[in-house]
Image (spheres, rainbow, N blue to C red):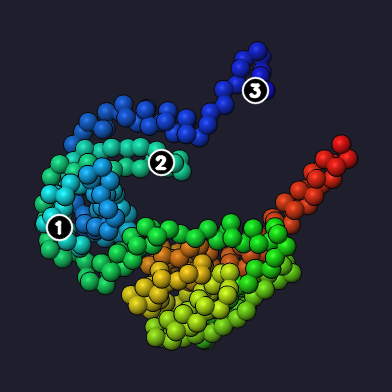
Amino acid sequence: MPNTSNNTVQNFYKPSELIGIFNSILAKQSVNAQVVFLRGVYLASGRQPYSGYFYDTLRDEDGQEELTLRLTQQQRDNLKNGNLVNVGGVLGRNVNNRGQIQIVLNVSRIDVVQEQAIDENEIKRMELRQKKSSDGFKNVDSILEQLLFTDQRPRIALLFATSSITMSDFEAGINAAKSAIDFTEYRANFSNAKELIGTLQSLDVSNFHVIALVRGGGARIESLDDVSVLQQIVSMSTPIIVAIGHVEEKIFIKQLVDKCAPTPNGLGQYFSEMVETVSEKKTKSRAALTEQIKK
């Protein structure tokens, strides 16, 4: 029965209903009728058209911010990944099924300003991110929570850099996690792409529930953005977590993994808090079951 207060009936909406309301409001905003002109780097999505339109990406020339472009096949024919383009169109906005507001530019014209605005490796990284988005990110939280809730011990491979001193940082946050999770440590030279890829391939077929790459910040951290390493990350069957560098360090690999911890210490805390949270849920579940039995 709906909650009432002062004889006023409380309305409860389904998420889909609220999303519909916001879509209706956004559709009436005047910005939808305004033509805007943008400049950025064009990146094809690689996905099939939807209702006759392609949904590609316009990225900042000097940053990672992106906007979705809605294009026809004809508009798309003369475009290549990495083109610097001027784009004109009308903004459309909607709320997706996750409750997120999406901005889409319905393109009316697009002109190539420069053939190659970013290098080939950067284009390959963008394509890998689009592939990962298309394939889908694995829900690490859900996987671990389900295992712990059913009294199974998750098997986690911890892959540290050969000369890393990260283990002390990790241990500082791990606390109670070892009581419920089995951790196995491995080492690899993160600056040697061939060695790192070989280790990842071996771990991917070793029956782990999750693989975590752990390394502190510092020199040569950008080696993890080697295209061949990123290709291996995207192809992994086992969910991948990274805890690499410091919070402010921006490396591309963080955009391709299934979960990213801010620091090695933060990863240890994540595992510890996961164990504690599931333990509390199990206790409450047992208490609720006991009460049901008593009734």
| Residue drawn 42% across the image and 81% down it | 197
Label 2 vs 3, first from the N-terminus: 3
* 229 or 161, nearer to the observer: 229
Q: Is residue 211 above or below residue 269?
A: below
Amino acid type shown at disc 2: Asn
Q: Is residue 262 in sight in this rendering?
A: no
> Farthest residue toward the top?
7
Instruction: Specify whether 84 is left or right of 276.
Output: left
Q: Secondary structure at mark 2?
A: loop
- The image's mark for residue 237 is none
| x and y percentages locating residue 157 in the rendered image | 58, 76
| Residue drawn 80% across the image and 45% down it | 289
The answer to which image quadrant residue 274 occupies is bottom right
Q: Is residue 17 above or below residue 293?
A: above
What is the crowding at mark 2: few (fewer than 14 residues within 10 Å), some, or many (at least 20)? few
- The image's mark for residue 96 is 2
| x and y percentages locating residue 7 in the rendered image | 65, 13
Q: Secondary structure at mark 1?
A: loop
- The image's mark for residue 2 is 3
| x and y percentages locating residue 248 in the rendered image | 45, 64
| x and y percentages locating residue 40 in the rendered image | 21, 54
What is the crowding at mark 3: few (fewer than 14 residues within 10 Å), some, or many (at least 20)? few
